[in-house]
Image: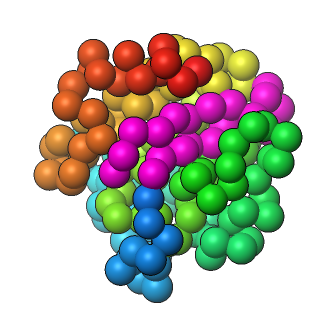
């Protein structure tokens, strides 16, 4: 995946995850169940396991949407191109573009935001540089331990990315 950015929609609406991807992905028609996500996240990292538990307990909702529906839900006033956003969080709900799913790291990233929301971290903090850093690090650490393709080589690259795009 190419470099992108993850930016806030504002204090009350949540945040969006932007990456470069191809809408002709071979995964565009792949069906991913809630159980698949829970199984993939459980036991990999401490945070991915917490997120999996919250999903299983229905404390975090997961919504995997087709392109049209996904794009219709994106805040058009945030300055992002809708076709570049692959995931976002609003409250305790995470939304992921079906055609962009090629691993479970996106669920860890957005799940981190939803987990923090459920644990009464302010939306302003969740979408801050620190909040984005936590989400990207959790995603990265999960990807490394799971053997998924990583977007950033290390945490220093994540920090540079956040400084450039947030």
Q: Nearer the viewer, residue 63 or 79?
A: 79
Task: Give the image quarter of residue 22.
Answer: bottom left
Region in magenta = 1-20
What residue lies at 55% left-to-right and 35% top-to-bottom? 6
Q: Position of residue 51 (x, y in %)?
A: 45, 46
Q: Quadrant of the C terminus?
A: top right
- Magenta span dominant secondary structure: strand
User: Can residue 158 be found in the magenta stretch?
Assistant: no
**Left-right relation of 45 to 86:** left
What residue lies at 16% left-to-right and 43% top-to-bottom? 145
**Left-right relation of 111 to 152:** right
Evaluate whether residue 56 shows in this view.
yes
Q: Position of residue 139 (x, y in %)?
A: 35, 39
Colouring scheme applied when the structure was drawn: rainbow
Q: Position of residue 30 (x, y in %)?
A: 42, 82
Q: Nearer the viewer, residue 77 or 106?
A: 77
**Left-right relation of 24 to 84:** left
What residue lies at 51% left-to-right and 35% top-to-bottom? 5
Q: Position of residue 64 (x, y in %)?
A: 58, 68
Judge whether 140 appears above or below 104 on screen. Answer: above
Judge whether 116 appears above or below 139 on screen. Answer: above
């Amino acid at each position: 995946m190419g470099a992108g950015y993850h930016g806030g929609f504002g204090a009350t609406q949540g945040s969006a995850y932007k990456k470069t991807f191809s809408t002709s992905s071979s995964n565009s028609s792949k069906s991913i169940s809630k159980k698949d996500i829970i199984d993939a996240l459980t036991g990999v990292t401490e945070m991915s396991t917490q997120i999996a538990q919250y999903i299983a307990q229905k404390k975090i909702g997961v919504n995997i949407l087709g392109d049209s529906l996904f794009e219709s839900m994106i805040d058009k006033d945030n300055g992002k191109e809708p076709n570049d956003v692959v995931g976002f969080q609003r409250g305790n709900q995470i939304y992921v573009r079906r055609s962009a799913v090629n691993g479970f790291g996106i669920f860890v990233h957005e799940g981190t935001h939803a987990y923090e929301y459920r644990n009464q971290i302010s939306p302003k903090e969740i979408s801050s540089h620190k909040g984005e850093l936590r989400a990207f690090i959790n995603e990265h650490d999960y990807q490394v331990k799971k053997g998924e393709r990583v977007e950033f080589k290390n945490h220093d690259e994540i920090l540079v990315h956040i400084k450039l795009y947030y």
